[in-house]
Image: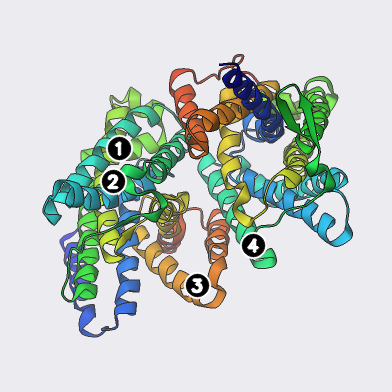
Amino acid sequence: MEAKLWSALQAVLNGVLTGSLYALIGMGMALIFGVMRIVNFAHGAFLMVGMYATYVLFDRYHVTPYLGFVVAAGLLFVIGVGFYRGLLRRVDERSHFMQILLTLGVALILTDGAQLVFGADYHKANIPLLDDHLRIGAITLNAPWVLSFGITVVLATGMFLLVMKTRFGRALRAIAQNRYAASLMGIDVLRTQALAFGLGLAAVGFAGGLLLPVFYLYPDVGEAYTGKAFVMVVLGGMGSIEGAAIAGVVLGIVESLTSLYWGNEWALAVDFALFLLVLSLRPSGLFGSQRV
Amino acid sequence: MTRRRVALAAAAFGLCLLVPAFVQQDYQLNVLFRVFLFAALGLAWNLVGGYAGQLSLGHAAYFGIGAYGLVLFHDRLAAPLPVAMALGIIVAVAAAFVIGRVAFRLRGPYFALATIAFAELVRLSAKNVHSLTNGDVGLQAPELFVEDRSRWFYWSAVALTALAFTVTALIARSRFGYQLQAIREDEDTAIACGIDPARTKLLALLISAALTAAGGALNASLFYYVVPDPILGIDVSNKIAIVAMLGGAGTLTGPIVGAVLLEISGEVFKNVFHEAHRLIYGGLIVVIVLFLPEGIVGAVAGWWRRRRS
């Protein structure tokens, strides 16, 4: 009985650690989809780009992923601003239909581009930290996960404050409420939107860099995360940054418990089932009400 | 449709039936099979995605259910092949009913996301319920045609396309078709005009799912095997949508044009680039969105209208 309890607790804690990285990915999507209302089907593909960027730094220049992830985030910020200004802006005010198609197209190009450049092989960044564990009673936690959890808490708090407390964040939320009125109030809509998209991708870049040491890397690695990111935004309530973060942790725990009791292969299915349940029963999300 | 256009369409499909007289290699016939298969799937998708304007990115579910239905009803219940295929189509329609009831309450991106979620649930179930589907190993599909199979499969794909084309042509000019288009243009106004969007969209989805499932059964039987990822994966859903939109969503001939272009170019690029052929789809989609938002047929029709006026 006690052993069962410990293994459940272990699963929950593992879920929290995985969930913290999900939270980062979800917060990026909350900015892009929740606040800006851009349906970004390339979210996972950008995560993959962040992972490969960190991997190249590690493999060629021996930069540890715990430094490389900052570079990956910077790179994705620049890509995000460029992508918004160059392509997305043109379909921003057209239908969601077009946004979905455009980002889907870009996702395919990125994924197969990565396959052309790096091949379909699996890569892994082997760092010494991987062998370290934290032991508390019967609980064992892998050191890289604990480290990335700490980093994620700092980043997520920073991002929340940026969107809720700064002038930039207020401008962004004003645009989300009424783009036209915002521009009349002297807000540079294009610049703010481009920065916000960049920020959303930077979050994904951070997450990608932090995922690298604990995951295998291959061109399709991001695919599952696009779906998960949408699940988190809907679960957390559209437009709620902190809601998406909480939803990320919840998703991590749910997946971890699903793996423990039903098997790993059902984890993704539970995500989607949860998503459909929330969409049909409580469209405003599980946590908090819908707001911008 | 004027009588002349009907004659033209009938003549075109008649000519397509004659192709095996000139093309005899199995490989080429199989490529042509896929052209017509995706033309039919694109036409089926077009009813929901084009005429009703509901972006379904989960049509792989019906395609896959049609395939698994044929295999499972034949293997487990010893149903004769046509009956097994029909039962598979019925299951796909039933699935479409459930999916539509939930998803059509949602609008815009949420609808698209819900269709993906449903298709993924079907795929993951097919992967994980080993006792029924044999998981990733897959099941062997029965042969619908044994003798002269490449030809017969080609002919049946042409027939399916002709069926989907006829159904679309009839719907497009019917009260039902106009209701679909009214919903696409403005759902609230459509409601104000006395249209029941939920029922109308659902009916379109049921017809679409039936045609898609028939295509899935044909495809599975030609390629001998049903395996979850290649037939239920999100790539299948995307491809079906892209075929229709490349040619022109909401146009009668668009999906056929799209299928010809995408399959032939895909086949060429596959031989040149090998594994990275999705790059081409991606590039094509970006080009459509930026330069041809109404698809090839839509763009040509617009150009023609402007020239005549």
Residue at 36% x, 58% y: name it. Answer: B255
Q: Earlier in the sequence, mark 1 or mark 3?
A: 1
Callout 1 amino acid: Ala
Query: Do dots 4 and 1 share one subunit?
Result: no
Query: Do dots 1 and 3 share one subunit?
Result: yes
Question: Is B20 on the left or on the right of B292, as rendered?
Answer: left
Q: Chain of mark 3?
A: B
Question: Is B35 on the left or on the right of B114, as rendered?
Answer: left
Question: Is B86 on the left or on the right of A198, as rendered?
Answer: left
Question: Is B287 on the left or on the right of B89, as rendered?
Answer: right
Q: How is the image coloured?
A: rainbow
- Residue of label 4: A121
Q: Nearer the viewer, mark 3 or mark 2?
A: 3
Classify mark 3: residues with Cα within 10 Å, few (<14), some (14-19) or many (20+): some
Q: Nearer the viewer, mark 4 or mark 1?
A: 4
- Circle on res. B96: 1
Residue A111 sits in which quadrant?
A: bottom right
Callout 3 amino acid: Lys
Q: Which one is in front, A78 or B165? A: A78
Q: Chain of mark 4?
A: A
- Circle on res. B261: none
- Residue of label 3: B270
Q: Which one is in front, A226 or A219? A: A219
- Residue of label 2: B208
